[in-house]
């Protein structure tokens, strides 16, 4: 089953539970108001009232269990995505380090490069590293020369290009574009 279908199915179940809960809350509210202001002249038979209260209690219990289940699934999915992000972040860092090695960057240039990839300006880098802005600019120019780019945008785009050249592997059904699969 595709993720989209699972989400749709879960959404339908949650909507049904919500509708039942709203109807039951309406019943209890109407019952409370009608007894308080005497709207109804003849009371409901006790059997009907008992069935409605049993149904209400059952609906609320189902709502609690469905809500707990949905919350547990969402938490599990969040933890799974967090784990995947850690792996992707680590792999990106390794890829960046490999490129830095290929460009023979000095440790100071590596620091500057990482700050640039994180989106810091020369002024912000100078504040973080306690260097003069002119020094940061000179190291940035040296870095760009070694990387074969002329500005920050090209520098960042370089890594996007490198990432896009990696084979696309989908882990849900082990189909990869590299192996002739469609990726779907």
Image (tube, rainbow, N blue to C red):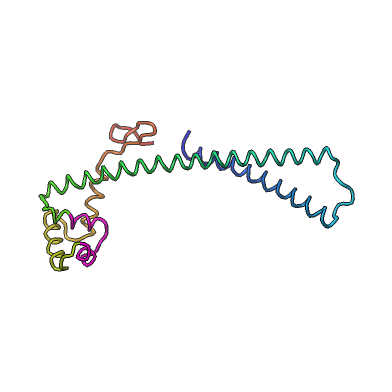
Identity of the residue drawn at 86% across and 55% down = 38
Residue 89 on image: x %, y %: 29, 45
- Which residue is more in the foreground, 17 or 59? 59
Residue 18's quadrant in the figure? top right
Q: Is residue 79 magenta?
A: no
Q: What main secondary structure does the magenta stretch of the protein show? A: helix
Identity of the residue drawn at 21% across and 52% down = 158
- The quarter of the rendered structure image containing the C terminus is top left
Identity of the residue drawn at 77% across and 38% down = 51
Identity of the residue drawn at 15% across and 68% down = 132
Q: Is residue 48 left or right of residue 130?
A: right
Q: Is residue 184 above or below residue 122?
A: above
Q: Is residue 76 left or right of residue 69?
A: left
Q: Is residue 115 magenta?
A: yes
**Count of residue discs:** 0
Residue 37 on image: x %, y %: 83, 57
Residue 77 on image: x %, y %: 44, 40
Q: Is residue 88 left or right of residue 63?
A: left
Magenta span: 111-128
Residue 96 on image: x %, y %: 20, 47
Q: Residue furthest right?
A: 41
């Amino acid at each position: 089953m595709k993720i989209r279908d699972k989400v749709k199915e879960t959404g339908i179940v949650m909507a049904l539970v919500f509708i039942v809960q709203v109807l039951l809350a309406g019943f209890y509210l109407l019952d409370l108001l009608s007894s308080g202001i005497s709207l109804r002249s003849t009371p409901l038979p006790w059997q009907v009232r008992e069935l409605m209260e049993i149904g209400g209690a059952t609906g609320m219990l189902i709502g609690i269990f469905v809500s707990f289940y949905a919350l547990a699934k969402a938490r599990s999915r969040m933890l799974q995505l967090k784990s995947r992000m850690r792996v992707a972040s680590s792999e990106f860092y390794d890829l960046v380090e490999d490129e830095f090695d290929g460009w023979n960057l000095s440790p100071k240039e590596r620091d500057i490069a990482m700050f640039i990839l994180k989106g810091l300006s020369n002024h912000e880098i100078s504040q973080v590293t306690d260097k003069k802005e002119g020094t940061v600019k000179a190291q940035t120019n040296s870095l760009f020369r070694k990387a074969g780019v002329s500005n920050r945008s090209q520098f960042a785009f370089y890594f996007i290009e490198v990432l896009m050249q990696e084979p696309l592997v989908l882990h849900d059904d082990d189909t990869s574009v590299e192996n002739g699969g469609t990726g779907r």
